[in-house]
Amino acid sequence: MKQKVLISACLLGINCRYDQKSKKIQKIVALSDEFDFIPVCPEQLGGLPTPRPSSFFIAGNGSETIKGAKNMINDAGNDVSEAFVNGAEQTLKICKMLNIKTAILKENSPSCGKNWVYLYEKLAQGSGVTASLLMKNGIRIKSENEI
Ligand code: SF4
C-alpha cells in the first residue's frame, strides 16, 4: 500500500491559487506513482474564494497566527487571519482523519510556506499558517524545493 501524503493542490496542477492558476511541478506529479497524494488547498478550505486577492503577513508569521495574532491582510486591506486559521484547522482535521504523517507544501505561500513567507512584499523566514499548525502537531513537512 502506498504511503498517504498530504500535498498542496496547486503543485499538482489544480487551479486553486489566488490568481486561479496552479504551480504544477511535473517531478512532483510523477511522485504519485510512489505516494498516495491527498490534495488540499487550505485557503479554499478556510472559505476564501478563487480567484481572491493575494494575502501576506504584516508581522511575524503563521506560528503567531495560530496563537491568535491578527497579522495577515489581503491586497484589499482586509484582515484574513481567521480564514487562514480555519483552513489550517480543516487541513489538520483531514490529516488526523486519514492518519497522514507527511506533507509536501508549497514554499512562500502564507498558508503552505514551510521556510519562507511574504512579509508585506518581501520574502522573510517563517512558516505559513497551515504549515505552522501541521508542524506543531507532528506532521513532517517538505517544501517542493526539498524534494
Ligand atoms: Fe497552493 Fe496552498 Fe496556496 Fe492553496 S493555499 S493555492 S494549496 S499554496
Image (cartoon, helix red, strand yellow):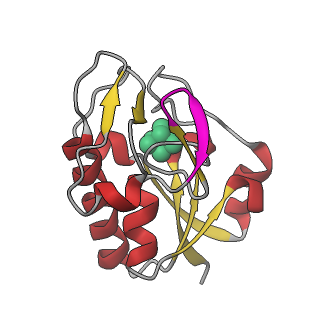
Above or below residue 119? Residue 115 is below
Q: Which residue is depicted at the point 35% across and 41% down?
A: 43
Q: Nearer the viewer, residue 32 or 88?
A: 88
Q: Which residue is depicted at the point 52% across and 36% down?
A: 14
Q: Is residue 18 visible?
A: yes
Residue farthest to the top, as pictured:
76
Magenta residues, dominant SS class:
strand
Q: Quadrant of the C terminus?
A: bottom right
Is residue 124 found inside the magenta-colored segment of the image? yes
Q: Which residue is depicted at the point 61% across and 38% down?
A: 123
* Direction from residue 65 to residue 31 in the image, left or right: right
Q: Is residue 147 visible?
A: no
Magenta-drawn segment: 119-125
Q: Position of residue 19 (x, y in %)?
A: 48, 20
Q: Position of residue 141 (x, y in %)?
A: 57, 69
Q: Nearer the viewer, residue 72 or 110?
A: 72
* Direction from residue 68 to residue 56 in the image, left or right: right
Is residue 23 found inside the magenta-colored segment of the image? no
Q: Position of residue 12 (x, y in %)?
A: 61, 44
Above or below residue 53? Residue 63 is below
Total labels: the figure holds 0
* Direction from residue 138 to residue 25 in the image, left or right: right
Q: Nearer the viewer, residue 21 or 53?
A: 53
Q: Which residue is depicted at the point 36% across and 48% down?
A: 42
Q: Quadrant of the N terminus?
A: bottom right
Residue farthest to the front, as pictured:
59
* Direction from residue 137 to residue 2 in the image, left or right: right
Q: Position of residue 76 (x, y in %)?
A: 30, 15
